[in-house]
Image (cartoon, rainbow, N blue to C red):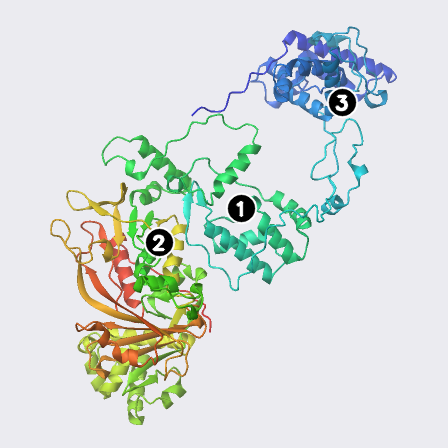
């Protein structure tokens, strides 16, 4: 690339001529002193003493002895202000340059050194007297005769007469006998001539500026009409207000969800249509609450909710697309749009704009929609006076163009490395290991299910460079939340949703029914990563258990425990002693153990010690410890103890039930972790088919191929569907095996579930012994209270592990508890588990979602994969999460 043109070498006056000029200055000073009574003023005395030998006295004391004498003389000689006597030369130079096609800038630069003036002083003088000089030039060029000076005596003082009709280029020596018509300032510091100062009216004054105020006060001032002096227009039917066709959309009914699609571009991120929509809805919502917010305050608030753009970047986005935001701001303040623009003008000036790099990211080439950075760069470069003249495009390289290990560095290697360095934060403040570790340890994540998105976010926070890909055009994978159209398209492609179910956008129906335990491991991950700032939660109304043919509520208070029909009076006393034993247990205090060793004795031993009935054992093991079957009874009691303590602490945290649920469905969870990954440098690619997992001759992971593109990385993580899903691969290797199946039935109801006290949300557990099965049946119900369906619609999902060849009949006991079902969607999903740890081939496969009603098993899988990928345990911080009551 060619750099900007080198500046031309400045012309200087020979030393002999400079000495002549100094002598002339001394003569002028002496004559001025004689006019003042023959006595020289102190400044004049300093002038005579200081300009001996062509250098001001005391200049050598400034530590500039290393500079040649002629350099100091040149600098001093070129600091003389331009005067009216120099105008003939200026006019002649303009007349000679314009016919040759030279610009005013080139003409004024060519005057550098003429008559002892620098180019900058020539420019200042021209700008201060532009009107008169231009009139003079136009008159002379039209009449084709020498210019005549016609200036008022009172404006400029005495003017020397011009003896010859043609303008002759004066030599520096001519200044010996010519006196300056304007007194020379003899202050020790020589500064360029100061431009006239014009007072700028305030915004209120601008609105009522009279026409007479537009007339310049003097001929030496620039007379221009701009936005600061122009009178305010009067709008009527013939002249409508600006942008009258732009309509302000209806404000949102809730705080908008921040965008999840983040596309890196250059040193920042690209503005997408989702960014624009979120920006408009957010400022509308914010101004509804506080109309006095300023533009800068709004941009800072937007940056807090959507930090993938800085507040400065959001302010720049406002400036470029200001029409609608300005109208929203004016409407919120009850002002006229045009006046609101003026009020915000000074604030907009204070918001500096950060220049964007002029190259485009290869991943976003061709995507013209929402190319905010390119617009901004263009608007900035249009105002630059000295843009680069190199239009040669920079070749874009992809990571799959990089050379193999051990080969010499190629252009693609250098390009990718330079791009990585430019995007790396605080490069000079980090060690070499921290700099290049993320670059060399890239991770590809396949699938945007909750497990994969949590791992993507955690690895991005740890500093790894993550590329996240999904074959679907939506987030969530098997744990997504679908709207009504997507639901019917998935299960019944040829049928449209009934209109009586309401609007499509009101639905977010989960494919996997699970709740979040309030004090569980997923809650800890949410607060550790601060993903809770993207989510809102609501508590599940109650937890119920099926026993002896009816539904009963799991007690959440002491009063409910006394009234509960789950146990008889004597059984309640025995259960109370059991729970007090668990509550008072201390590992370091043997007196609390009552002869039981939780790490050695089984739960059967513990139950027998307290004499609990089988029905009570089912209630404790399945409704509180949340086991799927009875295998836990013969195992050590420690895990069951931990599960019961977790349940009771979660119940005590918010009351009513131990579960919480995110508003707008479980699909918000993977989207929030995807946003976290994107903020920390992760890249997401949806609707991207995965054609091949590329390995080397030893079977180790190399990259992922999609079409003709191959992306290379050190490790890959993905759900089983991307790795054969139980099928044999080439060479007879099987990466995953099927452990079972889960049947799920999504049911749309128009009423609450009978027997649940008309709860708007609940969980019902049917222990396996109550229906003669090996595994429990779960029912999870949510409603419009959680913003997942239309009003007066309830969504209940019944699920269990398949045990026979007739899965739908196995969930019949749960379906019978629902009452009338408006519509039902049944699915059967295999449960896959990986055959290896992935440490040998760097291929790490997650597990399928099981039939449990909570996310504890999902988090266990996350912790296991995280440790295998990084070699370290996942350490979480302890904070609190806000939940709506």
Q: Are marks 3 and 2 in contact (CB under 8 Å)?
A: no
Pointer 3 or 2: first along the chain: 3
Rendering quarter of residue 284: bottom right
Marks 3 and 2, Cα distance to the nearest angstrom? 67 Å
- Total residue callouts: 3
- Chain-order first, disc 1 or disc 2: 1
Characterize the local packing of mark 3: few (<14), some (14-19) or many (20 or more) Cα atoms within 10 angstroms: some
Q: Marks 1 and 3, Cα distance to the nearest angstrom?
A: 42 Å
Q: Is residue 89 left or right of residue 815?
A: right
Name the foreground residue: 496 vs 385.
Answer: 496
State the image coordinates of residue 64 (x, y, percent, origin top left): 59, 20
Secondary element at tag 2: loop
Judging depth in this view, the residue of 205 and 493 nearest the camera is 493
Q: Which mark is residue 317?
A: 1
- Given this view, does label 1 or label 2 mark the residue nearer the observer? 2
- Left or right for 635, reference 440: left
**N-term-proximal mark, 1 vs 3:** 3
Does any portion of residue 483 appear in the rendered image?
A: no
Report helix, strand or loop for mark 1.
Answer: helix
Q: CA distance from mark 1 to mark 2?
A: 27 Å
Q: Residue furthest right?
A: 37
As helix, strand or loop, the secondary structure at mark 3 comes to helix
Tell me the residue that label 3 is attached to. 132
**Which label belongs to residue 473?**
2
Marking on residue 719: none
The answer to whether the residues at label 1 and label 2 have Cβ atoms under 8 Å apart is no
Pick out the residue farthest to the front.
Answer: 494
In which image quadrant can residue 424 be found? Answer: top left
Residue 552 located left or right of residue 373: left
């Amino acid at each position: 690339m060619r750099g900007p043109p080198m500046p031309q070498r400045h012309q200087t006056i020979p030393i002999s001529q400079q000495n002549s000029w100094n002598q002339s200055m001394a003569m002028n000073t002496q004559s001025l002193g004689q006019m003042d009574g023959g006595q020289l003023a102190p400044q004049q005395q300093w002038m005579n003493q200081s300009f001996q030998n062509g250098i001001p006295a005391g200049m050598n004391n400034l530590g500039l002895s290393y500079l040649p004498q002629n350099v100091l003389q040149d600098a001093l000689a070129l600091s003389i202000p331009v005067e009216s006597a120099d105008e003939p030369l200026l006019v002649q130079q303009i007349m000679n340059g314009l016919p040759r096609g030279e610009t005013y800038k080139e003409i004024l630069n060519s005057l550098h050194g003429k008559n002892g003036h620098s180019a900058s002083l020539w420019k200042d003088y021209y700008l201060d007297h532009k009107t008169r000089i231009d009139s003079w030039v136009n008159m002379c060029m039209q009449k084709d005769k020498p210019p005549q000076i016609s200036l008022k005596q009172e404006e400029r003082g005495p003017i020397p007469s011009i003896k010859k009709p043609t303008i002759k280029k004066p030599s520096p020596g001519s200044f010996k006998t010519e006196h300056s018509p304007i007194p020379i300032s003899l202050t020790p510091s020589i500064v360029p001539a100061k431009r006239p100062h014009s007072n700028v009216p305030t915004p209120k004054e601008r609105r009522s500026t009279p026409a007479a105020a537009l007339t310049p006060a003097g001929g030496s001032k620039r007379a221009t009409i701009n936005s600061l002096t122009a009178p305010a227009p009067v709008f009527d039917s013939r002249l409508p207000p600006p942008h009258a066709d732009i309509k302000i959309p209806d404000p949102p009914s809730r705080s908008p969800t921040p965008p999840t699609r983040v596309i890196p571009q250059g040193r920042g991120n690209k503005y997408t249509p989702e960014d624009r929509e979120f920006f408009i809805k957010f400022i509308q919502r914010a101004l509804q609450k506080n109309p006095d917010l300023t533009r800068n305050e709004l941009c800072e608030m937007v940056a807090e909710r959507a930090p993938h753009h800085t507040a400065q970047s959001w302010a720049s986005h406002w400036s470029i697309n200001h029409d609608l935001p300005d109208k929203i701001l004016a409407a919120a303040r009850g002002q006229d749009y045009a006046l609101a623009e003026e009020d915000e003008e000074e604030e907009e000036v204070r918001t500096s704009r950060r220049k964007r790099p002029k190259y485009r990211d290869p991943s976003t080439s061709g995507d013209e929609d929402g190319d905010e950075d390119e617009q901004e760069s263009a608007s900035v470069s249009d105002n630059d006076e000295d843009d680069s003249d190199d239009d040669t495009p920079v070749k874009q390289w992809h990571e799959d163009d990089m050379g193999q290990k051990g080969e010499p560095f190629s252009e693609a290697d250098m390009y990718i490395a330079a791009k990585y360095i430019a995007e790396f934060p605080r490069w000079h403040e980090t060690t070499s290991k921290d700099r290049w570790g993320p670059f060399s340890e890239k991770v590809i994540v396949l699938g945007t299910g909750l497990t994969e998105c949590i791992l993507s976010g955690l690895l991005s926070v740890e500093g790894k460079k993550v590329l996240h890909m999904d074959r679907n055009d939506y987030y969530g994978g098997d744990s997504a939340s679908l709207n009504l159209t997507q639901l019917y398209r998935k299960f019944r492609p040829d049928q449209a949703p009934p209109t009586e179910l309401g609007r499509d956008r009101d639905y977010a129906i989960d494919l996997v029914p699970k709740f979040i335990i309030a004090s569980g491991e997923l809650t800890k991950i949410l607060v550790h990563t601060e993903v809770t700032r993207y989510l809102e939660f609501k508590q599940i109304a109650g937890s119920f258990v099926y026993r002896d043919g009816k539904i009963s509520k799991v007690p959440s208070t002491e009063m409910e425990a006394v009234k509960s029909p789950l146990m008889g009076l004597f059984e309640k006393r025995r259960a109370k002693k059991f729970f007090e034993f668990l509550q008072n247990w201390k590992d370091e205090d043997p007196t609390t153990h009552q002869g039981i060793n939780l790490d050695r004795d089984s739960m059967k031993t513990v139950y027998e010690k307290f004499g609990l009935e089988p029905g009570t054992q089912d209630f404790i093991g399945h409704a509180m410890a949340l086991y799927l079957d009875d295998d836990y009874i013969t195992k050590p009691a420690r895990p069951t103890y931990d599960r019961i303590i977790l349940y009771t602490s979660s119940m005590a945290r918010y009351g009513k039930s131990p579960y919480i649920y995110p508003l707008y469905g479980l699909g918000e969870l993977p989207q929030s972790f995807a946003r976290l990954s994107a903020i920390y440098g992760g890249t997401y690619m949806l609707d991207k088919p995965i054609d091949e997992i590329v390995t080397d001759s030893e079977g180790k992971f190399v990259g992922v191929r999609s079409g003709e593109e191959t992306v290379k990385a050190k490790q890959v993580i993905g759900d089983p569907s991307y790795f054969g899903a139980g099928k044999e691969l080439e060479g007879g290797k099987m990466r995953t095996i099927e452990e079972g199946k889960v049947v799920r039935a999504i049911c749309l109801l128009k009423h609450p579930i009978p027997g649940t006290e008309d709860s708007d949300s609940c969980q019902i557990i049917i222990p396996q012994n109550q229906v003669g099965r090996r595994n429990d049946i779960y029912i999870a119900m949510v409603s419009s209270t959680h913003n997942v369906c239309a009003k007066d619609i309830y969504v209940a999902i019944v699920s269990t592990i398949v045990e026979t060849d007739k899965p739908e009949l196995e969930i019949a006991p749960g379906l019978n508890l629902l009452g009338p079902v408006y519509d039902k969607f049944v699915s059967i999903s295999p449960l896959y588990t990986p055959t290896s740890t992935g440490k040998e081939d760097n291929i790490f496969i997650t597990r399928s979602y099981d039939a449990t009603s909570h996310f504890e098993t999902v988090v266990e899988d996350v912790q296991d994969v995280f440790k295998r990928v990084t070699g370290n345990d996942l350490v979480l911080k302890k904070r609190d999460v806000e939940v709506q009551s």
